[in-house]
Amino acid sequence: MAAAKWALIFFAVAALTLVVLSKVIVFLNPPRPGRAAPPVLRRVERAIRWTIVIPAVLGLALIAATLVRG
């Protein structure tokens, strides 16, 4: 169970790091009307989605396992 806790902590730190990185990228390279976002920002936003989806699924699996054992 400790490994799951550390995995969730790892993904939380990764998500926060990616959010801060995306804010820095937007601050340094603000989007202009009618132009697409920079490719780096799109990659960071995609990474943010994955670092939120995976821990959410892992958390739901832990809840389900607890309910089954319970």
Image (spheres, helix red, strand yellow):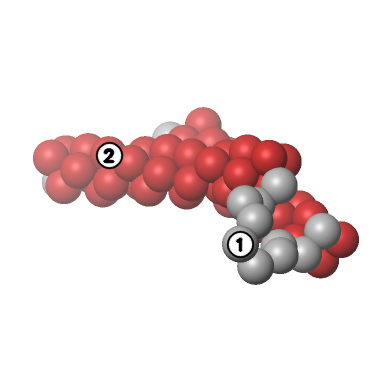
Q: Amino acid at mark 1?
A: Gly
Dot 1: what SS? loop
Q: What is the quadrant of residue 64 in the picture?
A: top left
Give coordinates of residue 58: x percent, y percent. 37, 39
Q: What is the quadrant of residue 33 in the picture?
A: bottom right
Residue that label 1 marks: 34
**Between tags 2 and 1, which lies in front?**
1
Above/below status of 48 relative to 25: above
Above/below status of 24 relative to 43: below
Dot 2: what SS? helix
Whichever of callouts 2 and 1 sits on the residue coming sooner in the sequence is 1
Q: Is residue 4 visible?
A: yes
Of residues 11 and 9, the one drawn nearer to the viewer in this rendering: 11
Relative to 23, 5 lies left or right: left
Give coordinates of residue 13: x percent, y percent. 66, 49
Q: Is residue 9 visible?
A: no
> What residue sits 28% from the left and 46% below the top?
60
Relative to 17, 64 lies left or right: left
Residue that label 2 marks: 61
Q: Amino acid at mark 2?
A: Ala
